[in-house]
Image (cartoon, rainbow, N blue to C red):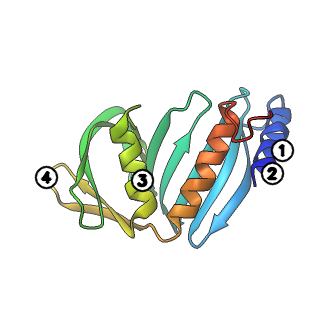
Amino acid sequence: MMSRIAMAAAVMMGFAGSAMAQQSEVLFSHKHWKVEIVGWDDGSLGCVAEVSAPGESFSVWTFPDQSVQLQFYSTAWQFAEGTTANLQVQIDRRAPWNLNNAELYQNSVLFNLPDSRAGVDFIVEVARGSRLYLRADDGSDVQNYSLSGSSASIDALIQCGDVLSGQSANPFN
C-alpha cells in the first residue's frame, strides 16, 4: 500500500499546477471510512480519513508538517467566520475530551490536535473506538459517528501522512 500512496502523492504533485481548486484520490476504503490524498491548486497536499453519512462527516486530516486537524461537518450548520466554541468529544464510554476554542467555519467545526502525547492518545482512541459523540460544552449531544473500520483507516492515514512528510517505513529509501 505504501507504494500506491507514494505514487498517488507524486501524481497529486503533478496536479498542483492545474487550474482545479482541489483534486483527490481515494487510497483506501473500509466499511464507512475512506482515506484520500488531496491536492490544492496552491501545490499543498493533505491526507484525510473520513467517515460520512448523507450531509454529515467526521474527518481526521494530516499535512506534510505532521499537523493533525479534526473536522466535523454538517449541512445543517452555518457558522459565521471567525467564531469559536468549546466542545466535548467522547469515544464510547471513555472520559470526554475537551476541544477548547474549536474554530467554527461555514458548515465545519475544526480543531488542531496538539503535537503531544494527548494528540496521539486521541487518535488511538478513535482507532480503537466504536462510536464518537460530539457534544456542546455543557455535554448536550450534537452529533455522533460510527468508528467501525477506523483502525484500518487510521493506519492508512498514518502511512499517507508519512509519505507526505518524507518519512518512510523503508530504511533503504
Alpha-carbon span between mark 2 and mark 3: 24 Å
Q: Which mark is residue 147?
A: none
In the rendered structure, which amino acid carries the disc numbered 2? Answer: Arg
Q: Of callouts 2 and 3, which one flags the residue occurring earlier in the amino acid sequence?
A: 2
Residue 66, percent across and down?
Answer: 55, 32
Q: Nearer the viewer, residue 148 or 151?
A: 151
Point out residue 131 in the picture as x, y percentages from the top left corner.
37, 68
State which quadrant residue 30 falls in: bottom right
Q: Which residue is mark 3?
A: 124
Q: Answer few, some or many: residues within 10 Å of disc 1's Cα (few below 14, many 20 plus, some between 14 and 19).
A: few
Residue sticking out furthest to the left: 138
10 Å crowding of disc 2: few (<14), some (14-19), many (20+) = few
Residue placed under numbered mark 2 in the picture? 4
Which residue is labeled 1 in the image?
Answer: 7
Mark 3 or mark 1: whose residue is earlier in sequence: 1
Left or right: where 136 falls relative to 150: left
3D distance between C-alphas at marks 1 and 2: 5 Å
Image coordinates of residue 20 in percent, x first then y, are: 77, 38
Q: Mark 4 to mark 3: distance in Å?
A: 25 Å
- Say whether marks 1 and 2 touch (CB < 8 Å): yes
